[in-house]
Image: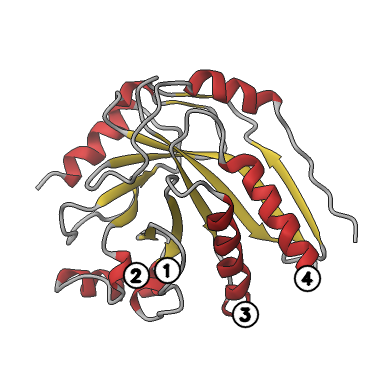
Amino acid sequence: MTTRLSICFTVAVALLIACQGPAAARDFKPGATVLWAWERPEDLRFAGPGVEVAAMTGFVVLSGNHVWARGRRFPLEVDPAARRIAMVHVQIDRRRPLVMSAELRRALAAAVLTYARPPGFFGVQIDFEVRASERPVLLNLLRDIRAALPESVPLSITALASWCETEDWLRGAPVDEIVPMLFRMGPAGEEVWAGLGSGDFRQPECHSAVGLSTDSRIDRLKRGRRVYLFDPKPWTPRAFADILRRLSP
């Protein structure tokens, strides 16, 4: 099998220079506000040092029996003192049937780790949406990444809301944080929000964090959890101030 790793360092180097700062405590701070910085130019210095940033540092694709990977292509600027999380996005190429093997599993973990530990970042987040038949791929990846990371580095994953509400297969996953995403949920969204109105997610592992979007509803959330924020457009000070106002009790 030929494993292809296309690694782009040009913008990644610029990213690291812009994001250098003092080392932070190696944990996920309860109740923190976190801005997601996805694959586009972003200047988040307006958010200040008290807001964390989860920046996409790598993009990894499983295609057939190959792995393709690259680094971030667009510049990112944050407050030098802000705590930063390296977020690696993983996806499966639906045009080519996945042919999983021990060799491909090792190549996938190596590709993710390439972008998971840039200097100045205190934690790692994996963003990997899988179908029911692909759950072992995600769980094995989490086990491999957790085993390779220093014990002091916290590991987070994003999750579909259904994974936290009606399913329990993530129970026991070797992660420190699960972030259920409460946006783009489709027809099942109203049922999820209704459940949150009377309590919390059925899976207790999903009680410490949540992912929200600036263009979706934000009601019925218990306070005290970490809140990850996504904007479908480039972040602006106005958009940030608006969603903070909506999050206020």
Label pair 3/1, CB-CB below 8 angstroms = no
| Mark 3 or mark 1, whichever is nearer to me | 3
The residue furthest front is 151
| Residue count near mark 4 (Cα–Cα under 10 Å), binned few <14, some 14–19, many ≥20 | few
Q: Position of residue 48 (x, y in %)?
A: 29, 23
Which residue is at a point 26% across and 29% down the rendered structure image? 50
Q: Which residue is mark 3?
A: 133
Residue 115 horizontal side relative to residue 214, left or right: right
Q: CA distance from mark 3 to mark 1?
A: 21 Å
Amino acid type of the residue tagged 2 in the rendering: Gly
Label 3's element? helix
| Residue count near mark 1 (Cα–Cα under 10 Å), binned few <14, some 14–19, many ≥20 | few
Going from N to C along the chain, the mark reached first, 2 or 3, is: 3
Label 2's element? helix
Which residue is at a point 79% across and 45% down the rendered structure image? 5
Amino acid type of the residue tagged 4 in the rendering: Ser
Q: Nearer the viewer, residue 79 or 229?
A: 79
Q: Which residue is mark 1?
A: 186
The residue furthest right is 1
Going from N to C along the chain, the mark reached first, 4 or 2, is: 4
| Mark 2 or mark 3, whichever is nearer to me | 3
Q: Which residue is mark 4?
A: 101
Label pair 4/1, CB-CB below 8 angstroms = no
